[in-house]
Amino acid sequence: MMPPTFTLLKTATRSRARAGILHTLHGDIPTPVFMPVGTQATVKSLTTDHLRTLNVPIILSNTYHLALRPGTDLIAELGGLHHFMNWDRPILTDSGGFQVFSLAKIRKIKPEGVMFHSHLDGSKHLFTPESVIDHQRNLGSDIMMPLDICTPHPATHAQTAHDLDITLQWAAQAKNHWEPDPRNQLLFGIVQGGIYPDLREKSATALQTIDFPGYAIGGVSVGESKAAVEAQIRHTAPLLPDDKPKYVMGLGEPENLKFAIDEGIDMFDCVLPTRLARHGHAFTATGRLNIKNATHTRDPQGLDPTCSCGVCTTYSRAYLRHLFMAKEMLGPTLLSLHNIHFLIQYVTQIRTQILEGTR
Ligand SMILES: [Zn+2]
């Protein structure tokens, strides 16, 4: 019998927002939580000491990329992903399904899984619901995700329903493969169904019959409008059980996080803070800032004057702009530090409001 995954501490007075604690083998995670993405077993340009300094409680890594290179067998041989990348806090690994459908050159869905050609060297691979669990066992992640089909947008109802049926079959197989040997790893179910409310309902109901320790909403923010993203979250979040963690995959815009938290979502991940940073963009309390703009050439103030992070309290916009103009490696590192700090603080403040009863 596994201990409970999630402790619900408090629900907000004016919205469905929740504050809780997600329990994993490598530690407790206060929720709501934003999880920075370390696709290749590294949150780009940052060390794990940086992540600890930023109070990052959990990171996400990617099964597709690590399975292709360097291989999950190699990572297992070297002590698992935590040891391999020097990170002793929780890790969530996604299933690789999203990357198979977005990156792989050629792919073919078969009843047993998905056959695809690597985007790296064209080599042929088969992901099955079982092999994807095995890859994540090799990695030793705290939270695993099952193989799913992330239906592209736009897609017809018929196509989405067809993909969903396969995804639900794969979810049941993943659960059956995981359950006899859970190894303190959690397995979440992923609600698919695209923009179609009836399919989201079917998916949420079927997954709860299979029964997972937590639930994710997938296939959101894959090219549809902001209104469609919000409609899917508003519709799907209440279909999931309140005593389990609820996770929307792939959201990183502060406004989207706020919306989803108020609909009762607990977990988020996105490459956005580090990707923006590499292009010289920073989140600030007053919106996005492009450090490469000439207006910052002689600006002595910090990136975001209201931010308490080590970058904003130390370096001027003029210096940060200079780093980007000179294409220095430190530029993306410093902006990544700030952007991740910004999102971590953003959700932490909302969590405090929930706990204090002011939200
Ligand atoms: Zn800052």
Image (cartoon, rainbow, N blue to C red):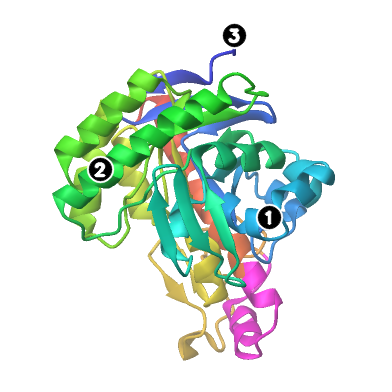
The structure residue drawn at horizontal position 45% and vertical position 51%, both measured from the top left corner, is 114
For marks 1 and 2, the one nearer the N-term is 1
Q: Residue furthest top?
A: 1
Q: Which residue is mark 3?
A: 1
- Mark number displayed over residue 292: none
60 relative position to 211: left or right: right
Residue 136 sits above or below residue 21 on the image: below
Query: Observer-nearest residue: 51 or 160?
Result: 160
Question: Percent position (x, y) of residue 249?
Answer: 42, 46
Q: Secondary structure at mark 1?
A: loop
For marks 3 and 2, the one nearer the N-term is 3
- Mark number displayed over residue 193: 2
For marks 3 and 1, the one nearer the N-term is 3
The structure residue drawn at horizontal position 65% and vertical position 87%, both measured from the top left corner, is 327
Q: Residue furthest front?
A: 111
CA separation in Å, label 3 and label 2: 31 Å
Under mark 1, the amino acid is Ala
Question: Percent position (x, y) of residue 76?
Answer: 78, 43
Q: Which residue is mark 1?
A: 41
- Specify start and end residues of the magenta stretch as a single range: 314-334
